Amino acid sequence: MPDGKQRMRIESVARQVEQVLERLGWIPEEQLGYAARLGVGVDELALEFDDVFRLVVGLVHAGVIPEAVAEALRPVDGILADMSHSSRAEWDAWAVMESVAWAELRELAGVALDLLRRADFEADEGA
């Protein structure tokens, strides 16, 4: 059973992951508006995901949260990696509004969010 400090960290990570997945699942206009409010490019959504994904992977390796949490995020990480390595422009307003990759990203983010909302972020003691 995690101590109070560790439980707070797990809850904080869970909230961060949910927030990032929610933003990735937003409709294009919301995503573009979010980036504009921050004064950054829409690739900030991918950078935010990468930050929390790395955190999750580290916590899985430390035995703090279960592998299932990282597994739920891997499809989102995969499509973002594909988009980053694509020869197509995936990080402009047109792509956000029209590209198949962004539509798939929104769908995968929704699936991951649903899985995580039903998952237990606490690692099994025997793990």
Image: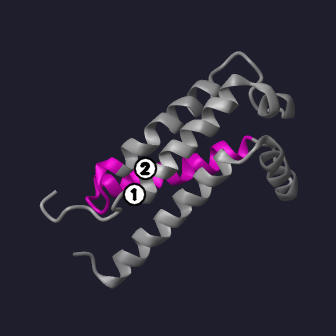
Which residue corresponds to mark 2?
A: 115
Residue 64 location, quadrant: bottom left
Q: CA distance from mark 1 to mark 2?
A: 5 Å
Q: Position of residue 1 (x, y in %)?
A: 21, 75
Residue 118 is marked as: 1
Q: Secondary structure at mark 2?
A: helix
- CB-based contact (under 8 Å), mark 1 and mark 2: yes
Q: Residue at x 51, y 37 (%)?
A: 77
Q: Residue at x 63, y 51 (%)?
A: 48
Magenta span main SS: helix
Amino acid type of disc 2? Answer: Leu
Say left or right for 95 vs 56. Answer: right
Q: Position of residue 105 (x, y in %)?
A: 61, 35
User: Could you classify mark 2 by the number of other residues whose Cα lies within 10 Å: few (under 14), some (14-19), or many (20 or more)?
Assistant: some
Q: Which residues are magenta?
A: 43-68
Residue 118 location, quadrant: bottom left
Taking depth in this image into account, of 73 and 26 the one nearest to the observer is: 26
Q: Residue at x 72, y 47 (%)?
A: 44
Question: Is residue 44 found inside the magenta-colored segment of the image?
Answer: yes
Q: Position of residue 8 (x, y in %)?
A: 42, 78
